[in-house]
Image (cartoon, coloured by chain):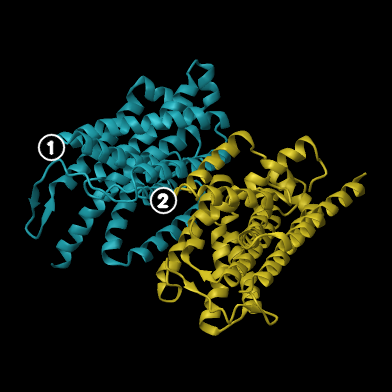
Amino acid sequence: MRSRWVNKATALHLGVIAVLFALQFVLPDYHHVNLARVMVLASFAMGYNIAFGYTGLLSLGHAMFFAAGLYAAGLMALFAGVGAGGGLLLGVIAGLVVAAAVGCLALRTTGVSFMIVTLMFAQAAFLATFYFGEYTRGDEGFVIPSNLRSLFGLSLVEPTTRYFVALTLFSLCMAVSFAIARSSMGRVLAAIRENEERTRMLGYNVFLYKLVALVISGAISGAVGAAYGMLFGYVGATFASIQYSILPLLWVLMGGAATVLGPFVGTLLMFYLVDISSGFTSANMLIVGLALIGLILFFPKGILGTLRERAAPWLP
Amino acid sequence: MDFGPYLLLATLEGAVGAAVLALTALGLSLVFGVMRIVNVAHGAFFMLGAIVAWWVADTLAAGPALNFLAALVISPLAVGAVAVLAERLVLRRLNYNPESTIVATIGLLYVIEQVALMTYGPDARPVVAPLDFRVQLPWFGYSGYKLLVIGASIVVMLAVWWGLTRTRIGLMMRATQFDSETARAFAIPVDRVYGGVFAFGAMLAAIGAVLVVPIQQAHYLMGNDPLLLSFIVVIIGGLGSLRGTVLAAVIIGLSDGIISVFFSPTLAKIIATLIVAMILVIRPKGLFGTQSA
């Protein structure tokens, strides 16, 4: 029984990637760029989901990990001429190191304290981008020179390459999420989320599991940050602001926490909701606010979470 | 100016900041203490208070003193009404689950901020101070209004303390904070206490905002700094401890004022946020707190 479910789930996820692959041939230019952006942001949300969805670590500081990767890649490109490949690697390392350092401290707290501690660290990181404005150029940000934005000799400025890189990143993140959700480690993480004390009593090193989950989550966020900088060419302090910690939370909540595809569904919906609404109002964060309240009130499990509960229990 | 008078000026500026901060943080602390929820929209209530104050002064146009007094009455009432509405429509339905309410109040923060942007606009506008005299010290003149702010804040805090410890409503609030189940068993209308506390917390923020508009202009993003500082104060003071909150507000307000006069404000903020994070890591109950977050 279980193996058939696994197959069904594997088929669904491979199918999603295949559809995304095929879509690039039919989509008009505007949506082509948008979808590439959505896939990159959805990868960020999937990274966030590993901490928040699977482990129950409600972090309000993921912008810090995203920005760590973004600035690692961006600054090294600007000042040392490092290209996209090196930039991505640096992004992973930066996200990993920052997450490990923050995790060692912040994971000593739980619940509301954890949210506030991560928020405070992220705020300090955000302010640091202004304090070192000489290099980062603060709010204004800087543009990564387009000659450095190439991977294996292919220019990332080119929409087709960009789409491919975004899709590859997205597929990799999905594979990691899928593997964690199916692994024994994923089960321990879920156990920690449901009842931390009981898991500790069973003899698991809860702190270590939470740290590993946060580090994986941070490394993915860092990689996505670096990829975002390399693909779209702009690095700025906005990406370190609290808004970029809240957005992945919103996307994951909307799509369904602790589902592999939920972050993508949430990101896609929210992206187009804001995109369409910005046609007639400049206050498009209003939509984000209303969506947050509406979701937490009526769909606390998100779209795929509700679907899994009602119709498709095999959804990972 | 010599170092002595310069320090005095910095201390005075810090004291004004501390006075407003203490009111705002007291509101946040009451809500956390009684309802056990973190209200992220607290800064938005602060901002709303300032904008309503500007709106009252602009519509009334009856001279600075009268404008200000009217704002001081109307603004907290209006903000309190919004808070009651939010509590009824959203928080109550979430059953005050700590994590859900944080997400919901983040949403509320965006809604209030964006509605303010759509109606009030992106400009910063001042309210004229109700009195216009300077206290002449031997070294420099100091705004009399700022001294009034310090006095008004102390009066409000004493009133809150008196209300909490000496009145029946205060007793109900303390009983709910201590043990809401038992309080309910003793026929205390816990739901109404929650609604009242949430509104009262927002009103304290609004009072702080009305006091601050003549010094700092009303702007739709002005709530972010007070929110962060109030968080810091409530955490350092100990989540749920009112005495700790006031003490921490004085310490942080003063040091924020003094540090930002002598050092780069960005560096001061970085250091302050890191210190707060570390305090929470080492002592999750805060410096004076008895309950964990």
Image coords of residue A62 (percent x, y):
57, 58
Image coords of residue B244 (percent x, y):
38, 43
Q: Report if residue A57 is visible in the image.
A: no
Q: Which chain is indicated by disc 2? A: B
> Is B51 or B288 nearer to us in this picture?
B51
Q: Colour of chain A?
A: yellow
Query: Against B263, is A255 above or below?
Result: above
Residue position for label 2: B228
Residue position for label 1: B63
Secondary element at image label 2: helix
**Which quadrant of the structure image shows residue B205?**
top left
Q: Are marks 2 and 1 in contact (CB under 8 Å)?
A: no
Image coords of residue B97 (percent x, y):
57, 35
Instruction: Residue at 48%, 26% (x, y): give it.
Output: B176
Query: Against A148, is B176 above or below?
Result: above
Q: Is residue B64 left or right of residue B28?
A: left
Q: Colour of chain B?
A: cyan
Q: Is residue A4 left or right of residue A288?
A: right
Badge count: 2
Q: Which chain is indicated by disc 1? A: B
Secondary element at image label 1: loop
